[in-house]
Image: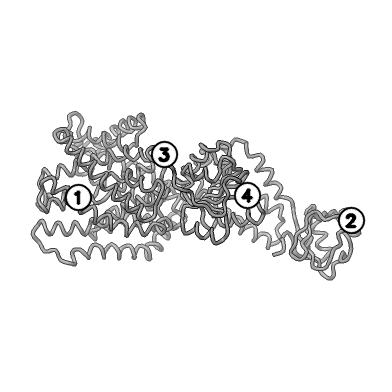
Amino acid sequence: MGIATDLILIVLAGLIGGLIAKRFKQPLIIGYILAGIALGPYTGGATISQVGELENLAEIGVALLLFSLGLEFPMREIKPIWRIAFLGTLIQVVLTLVFGFFIGRFMGWERVPSWWFAVAIVSSSTSVTMKTLVSRRLMGTLSSRVMLGMSIIQDITVIPMLVVLVNVSSGGDVGVMGVVKPIATAFIFVAIMMILGARLIPFLLRLVANWNSRELFLLAITAVGLGVGYITRSFNLSFSFGAFIAGIVLSRSEYVHKALSDLIPVRDIFGLLFFVSIGMLMNPHFLYANFWLILGLTLIVGIGRGLLLGGIGFSFGYRNIVPLAMVLGMIPISEISFIVARAGVESKGISNDVYSIILTTVVMSMILGPLIAGLTRPVYDTFKRLFKPEQVRTVNVDTDKLENHVIIVGGGHTARYIGFVLKSLQLPYVIVENNHRIFQEFRQDGLNAIFGDAAEYHILSAASIQRAKLLLVATSGFGSVINILNTARELNQDIRVLARAENREQIEQLGKNGVNEVIQPEFEAGLEMARQALLSLNVSAVGIQQHLDSVRREQYNPLEDIKDGSHNLSQLLSSINMIDLNWLEVKADNPFVGRTLSESNLRREHGINVVGIIRDKQFETDPDAEFKIKLGDYLALIGKPDKLRSFMSFTGNKRNGKAPA
């Protein structure tokens, strides 16, 4: 059966390896890599025969992983970290090259092989880092965005360096164009994709989606990711780089959530092939004979490069857990190192022994990387317990007096608006903001704020979460939201939580994590615009509210199912909004001008109740019977729809159901 038999063996071995990894609470990729070692040509028993073909399929797995990363990593996520992603990565690449070169010289290698080794270890594995973050539910956190952003730029920098080394090793000239061309090509490609691709790809998906065929839609999504990757390959750029840019472009369309949910099963199957193929490259006999050399080299390279990354992160203003996550989470060396090592052998830049050392070191880093990354949170928590946390920076906050207050986490402008409302109502609140620039803006606005990461115990403790009444999580990164929830629940098990979600899948996950209420901003904005439009069309407020409540229940149904009937209070509060509240502007021809509410006798003669009056922009609720109606007043009326329509017609007022602006 040839390759079909190989695929069956890979799936079965991957399942066994995955079960073993899950049993020991480790990321699945470790089990996949171990399964690849077992199926590789260097061990006995069942062996893969079509290694070359499987390596090509594995490359598709990398491309799909990067494509899905692009879908989850839109441009709005890149903008806040662009300085460290570009400038910080370039600094790290230069320092790592020097670091790797001296390691090679220490190993006794000549200058050229040492440079080959340095280039091979420059980049961290985006695919392994991403899978590790996904398995630990850390995607969307600030540290994950920084790590993945830097690792992608690292891979791009390898291309021109590879061109230079190949020319040097083969005795050719290192022309300026040889270095500039791949970089210029990459920039031109990105520009074309952002301008042309941003129009063509959504158009194609819109066309396919109109046929309501899930199979065809999945095929179109996969074709976009792999097709764009193939185009970049034809221009001597990375196949996975093109797929990643395609994902970035598609992330700005309305089909991103469906594309990601449909693509994940296909991505994971091809990802299995990739990680198994990585394991097949490992020669256990070579590792056994050089175990201490490989282990020491892996740790020196991983931790040394990690310290460089963490130091750069710290120097760019990132604090708390982010630098430590960079130190321990970016140990796996990039899969692009296999291409570098193979090119080094083919150009006679390195010997077979150096090739084997590079290859085994890379695979070993991919095995150890997820294990070491799992130490990030325990190490950070231990550090915080042993050392006094840094002084919490606050604005207008007396933390000792905070009680029964609202804690607002992140969200930028959203947090500002909530803060202004609570401040105007003189209700106790505090905003926790991790962005220093926004924190300074809160200072200028006179808002109560604390600077720091709300996922950290001492930050939420400074916000007096133990005595808080409500936690509003307005930040958009889903991984960050989960981390904040976990910390909040440990400090206050009973606190009521309202969080932000981007889609129905997140609503369901937040419900499982104990969130009481969920808000989907774009969905709620759409409902409010629909409500305003229907009011302008003189649709009854009762009918509008009933319909919008029906739509809202359908959208938030995953959360309500999880809450299992505990949302009766929410339904009761929602039903209050169904009272048909109408506004009557008192004009000159109004028969009630100059009369008191008692003299007007509205309830007995017209079946109408006046529940509020706006006069001179001041709102008075529940006016008494002696309140005299004046010209220019706005009366808030409730009553049955037919009574309201009849009364509006009697007064000659056409406004119905809309409060004065």
Quarter of the C terminus within the rendering = bottom right
Q: Which residue is mark 2?
A: 605
Q: CA distance from mark 3 to mark 1?
A: 32 Å
Q: Judge whether residue 126 can be spotted in this image.
A: yes
Q: Earlier in the sequence, mark 2 or mark 4?
A: 4
Q: For residue 627, which quarter of the picture?
A: bottom right
Query: Residue 253 placed where, x, y %?
Result: 44, 57
Quarter of the N terminus within the rendering = top left
Q: Which residue is mark 3?
A: 381
Judged left or right of residue 471, residue 312 is: left
Q: Which residue is mark 1?
A: 100
Q: Earlier in the sequence, mark 4 or mark 3?
A: 3
Q: Nearer the viewer, mark 2 or mark 3?
A: 3
Q: CA distance from mark 4 to mark 3?
A: 30 Å
Q: Earlier in the sequence, mark 3 or mark 1?
A: 1
Mark 2: few/some/many CA within 10 Å (<14, 14-19, 20+): few
Q: Are marks 3 and 1 in contact (CB under 8 Å)?
A: no
> As rendered, which of 292 and 127 lies closer to the eye?
292
Local secondary structure at mark 3: helix
